[in-house]
Image (cartoon, rainbow, N blue to C red):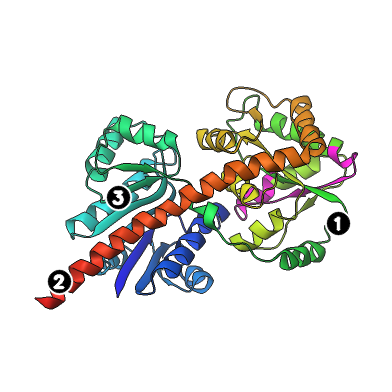
């Protein structure tokens, strides 16, 4: 039996991070029946129940220490774990896990990670020292590769793959339709999904950004579309979503239930199109081949919009949202729908294939562990 530990931002109610954990655990089970999976989590009971794996409290130092000591391989991922934009403390947490794992002689893989921003000189130095000691590095975009190489990481070989969420399996269409009916969302209309997050750094202020987007939504409702707000992090995204609804003059809807990543993926599959800031709602749209417009607040969103060939509705880091522009983009998508879907399909197939490379490289490490365990047993 191989013991595998996943260290990521899990148990906090972020659908994107939960999607990566869901995809990772499902893929590992599919390719290796002799692996016992444990994950660090803020909410271990939820993680145990939801994913049918072992889980321990991520802030219990003794439990984390013992888990690292007992496991054969540690996966750091997915998501953007190595960054100091949130805090230096967060960065040091993940680096400490990697460092301790290597001190115990364990294999470590950065699995589909995003990197950065990392601005602190000491923080960059620590990443260079620690990450140069790991066994495998896969990154979800070339921007992260550039950041990691700029920090000075030059070993092992860096593989640019794609976000693990591209391999997530969806709940059924029938289940998704039942969810929508239960929430009173009109399924007889074309539904436009909207996914936003708090972002007080928005150019011109968050209130201005929300009002402009609300005006776009009003215009779409007048075109006989239904607007559905989809919170991707509960409950954090609910308040900002309700603020947008309150800024509209027309009626809009919001998902109120708590759903699994596979359920959210299925619900997004019922949409006609998506307007979103959240990376994983864009990835979910791609997986279901739902054309999208992205609103850029972070380089990772810009990167994936380009990779998917989908329009950017505005970069709110350095410009106010242009409601005429984003409305015109949505009308173009609706008018030339088949062309946009075909383009999205061609781009997404490539990214799905790249995402599967995370597991191929992990499988190689699992085989090395099997060999090492076999040699020890022979001795």
List the residue tagged with mark 2. Answer: 375
Q: Of the residues tagged 3 and 1, which is closer to the observer?
A: 3
Residue shown at 34%/36% (left/top)?
A: 148
List the residue tagged with mark 1. Answer: 186
Q: Earlier in the sequence, mark 2 or mark 1?
A: 1
The front one of 68 and 146 is 146
Q: Earlier in the sequence, mark 2 or mark 3?
A: 3
Residue 267, position as x, y percentages in the image: 71, 58
Q: Quadrant of the C terminus?
A: bottom left
Q: Quadrant of residue 222?
A: top right
Dots 2, 1 in contact, CB < 8 A:
no
Q: Quadrant of the N terminus?
A: bottom left
Q: Secondary structure at mark 1?
A: loop
In the picture, measured across the screen, residue 89 lies left or right of residue 186, that is: left
Residue shown at 58%/62% (left/top)?
A: 169
Residue 338, position as x, y percentages in the image: 76, 42
Q: Secondary structure at mark 3?
A: strand
List the residue tagged with mark 3. Answer: 136
Please give the range of residues in magenta. 220-240
Dots 2, 3 in contact, CB < 8 A:
no
Number of other residues with Cα within 10 Å of mark 2, as a class: few under 14, some 14 to 19, many 20 or more: few
The front one of 181 and 83 is 181
Q: Secondary structure at mark 2?
A: helix
Please tell me whether residue 120 is drawn above or below residue 95 in the rendered image.
Answer: above
The front one of 129 and 113 is 113
Queried whether the magenta region covers residue 156, the answer comes back as no
Queried whether the magenta region covers residue 228, the answer comes back as yes
Q: Is residue 282 visible?
A: yes
């Amino acid at each position: 039996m191989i013991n595998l530990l996943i260290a990521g931002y899990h148990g906090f109610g972020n659908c994107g991070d939960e999607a990566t954990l869901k995809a990772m655990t499902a893929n590992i089970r599919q390719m290796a029946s002799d692996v016992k999976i444990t994950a660090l989590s803020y909410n271990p009971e939820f993680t145990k129940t939801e994913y049918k794996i072992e889980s321990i409290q991520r802030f219990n130092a003794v439990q984390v220490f013992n888990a690292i000591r007992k496991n054969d391989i540690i996966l750091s991922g997915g998501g953007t774990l190595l960054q100091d934009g949130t805090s230096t403390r967060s960065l040091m947490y993940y680096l400490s896990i990697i460092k301790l794992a290597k001190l115990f002689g364990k294999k470590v893989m950065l699995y589909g990670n995003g990197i950065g921003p990392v601005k602190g000189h000491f923080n960059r130095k620590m990443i260079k020292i620690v990450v140069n000691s790991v066994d495998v590095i896969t990154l979800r975009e070339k921007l992260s590769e550039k950041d990691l190489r700029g920090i000075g990481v030059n070993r092992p070989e860096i593989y640019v793959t794609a976000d693990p969420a591209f391999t997530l399996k969806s709940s059924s269409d029938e289940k998704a339709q039942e969810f929508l009916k239960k929430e009173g969302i009109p399924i007889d209309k074309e539904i436009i999904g909207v996914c936003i997050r708090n972002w007080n750094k928005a150019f011109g202020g968050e209130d201005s950004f929300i009002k402009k987007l609300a005006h776009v939504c009003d215009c779409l409702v007048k075109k006989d579309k239904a607007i559905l707000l989809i919170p991707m992090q509960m409950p954090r995204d609910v308040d900002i979503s309700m603020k947008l609804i309150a800024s509209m003059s027309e009626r809009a809807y919001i998902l109120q239930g708590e759903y699994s990543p596979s359920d959210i993926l299925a619900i997004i599959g019922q949409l006609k199109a998506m307007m979103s800031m959240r990376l994983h709602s864009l990835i979910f749209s791609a997986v279901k081949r739902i054309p999208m417009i992205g609103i850029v607040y972070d380089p990772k969103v810009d990167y994936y919009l380009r990779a998917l060939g989908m329009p950017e509705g505005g970069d709110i880091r350095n410009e106010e949202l242009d409601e005429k522009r984003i409305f015109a983009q949505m009308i173009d998508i609706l008018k030339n729908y088949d062309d946009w879907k075909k383009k999205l399909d061609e781009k997404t197939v490539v990214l799905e294939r790249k995402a599967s490379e995370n597991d191929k490289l992990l499988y190689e490490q699992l085989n090395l562990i099997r060999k090492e365990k076999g040699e020890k047993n022979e001795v």
